[in-house]
């Protein structure tokens, strides 16, 4: 609960929305002893299954969740970050902490901060690096946090599988870390997919693979991993690459590479994902 703007004791947390990453993060909080709410309305059976498995409690609406929560955590695809914040603001006054833990550009994070400020919220910026946190492998995933109340949010995750790390800098520093990190990890994966597609289109794929075996023996395995991930998650990574491109452009750097990476992932995504 909040006491004079400080979180103490059991904290009620609203989670929007429990996808694979969000449900895992929510599970960390539930196992830590916090009450974690979510909104089933309009969500799939798969989402409901994840929420139940993570120990989350159902709320009847976003407004009901916001009325009960001390902290709202947004973990959704990049394109949904602003609409999710607007839904909270539209639900009425929310004087708690709003944590945006999405893969968005610092500029987008500033927009989210402005929207949630209208509702009276304290904004904390977040960026998750790694796979969904797993109690069997604590510390494998990290949640970078920035903003005036980032330390309070970090304390909620203390002792869980999600390693929360508070960093200095501007309020949107955590998003900047996420953009820079994913700009390399996912951006380089897109480049690898593109160059092999070029070799295939030109009829020299076997020659390229033979050269990789001689001079770059790790690339076939990296390509296979990139291909699997892009097929399963390319629909979401497209938006992430667009956010990275926007981050680059905002700082006077070329955004074209990551715009191209967005196209690569869009082409690679398996239908239905």
Image (spheres, helix red, strand yellow):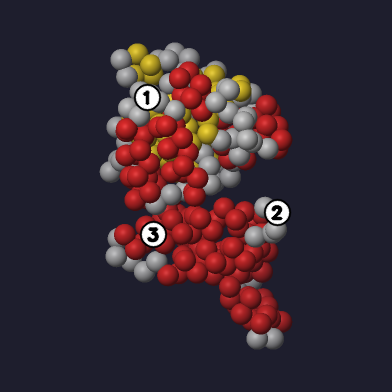
Q: How far apart are marks 1 and 3 (CA)?
A: 31 Å
- Of mark 3 and mark 2, the one earlier in the sequence is 3
Q: Do the residues labelled 3 and 2 touch (CB within 8 Å)?
A: no
**Which SS class for mark 3?**
helix
Q: In which quarter of the image is residue 205?
A: bottom right
Dot 2 alpha-carbon crowd within 10 angstroms: few under 14, some 14 to 19, many 20 or more: few
Q: Which mark is residue 187?
A: none
Where 88 sits versus 203, above or below? above
Residue, disc 1 = 93
Q: Where is residue 32 in the image (x, y as percent from the top left)?
A: 54, 21
**Which SS class for mark 1?**
loop
Q: Quadrant of residue 54?
A: top right
Please report the residue visible at 57 percent of the width from the left and 27 percent of the height from the top: 38
Q: Residue 246 carries which label?
A: 3
Q: Position of residue 255 (x, y in %)?
A: 40, 66
Please report the residue visible at 42 percent of the width from the left and 32 percent of the height from the top: 90
Where 83 sits versus 70, above or below? below
Q: Where is residue 22 in the image (x, y as percent from the top left)?
A: 56, 37
Residue, disc 2 = 272
On screen, residue 254 versus residue 134, left or right, reads left
């Amino acid at each position: 609960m909040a006491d004079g703007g400080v979180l103490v004791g059991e904290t009620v947390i609203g989670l929007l929305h429990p996808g694979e990453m969000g449900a895992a993060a929510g599970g960390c909080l539930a196992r830590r002893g916090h009450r974690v709410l979510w909104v089933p309305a309009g969500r799939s059976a798969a989402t409901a299954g994840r929420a139940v498995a993570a120990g989350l409690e159902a709320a009847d609406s976003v407004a009901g969740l916001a009325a009960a929560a001390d902290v709202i955590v947004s973990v959704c695809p990049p394109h949904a970050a602003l609409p999710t914040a607007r839904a909270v603001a539209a639900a009425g006054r929310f004087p708690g902490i709003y944590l945006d833990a999405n893969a968005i550009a610092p500029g987008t994070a500033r927009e989210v901060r402005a929207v949630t400020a209208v509702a009276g919220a304290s904004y904390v910026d977040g960026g998750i690096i790694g796979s969904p946190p797993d109690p069997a492998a604590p510390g494998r995933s990290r949640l970078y946090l920035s903003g005036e109340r980032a330390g309070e949010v970090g304390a909620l995750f203390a002792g869980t599988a999600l390693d929360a790390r508070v960093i200095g800098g501007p309020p949107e520093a955590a998003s900047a870390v996420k953009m820079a990190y994913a700009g390399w990890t996912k951006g380089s994966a897109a480049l690898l997919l593109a160059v092999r597609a070029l070799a295939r289109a030109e009829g020299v794929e076997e020659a390229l693979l033979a050269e990789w075996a001689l001079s770059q023996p790790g690339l076939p395995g990296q390509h296979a991993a990139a291909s699997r991930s892009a097929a399963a998650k390319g629909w979401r990574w497209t938006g992430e690459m667009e956010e990275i491109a926007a981050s680059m452009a905002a700082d006077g750097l070329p955004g074209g590479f990551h715009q191209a990476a967005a196209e690569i992932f869009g082409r690679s995504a398996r239908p239905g994902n």
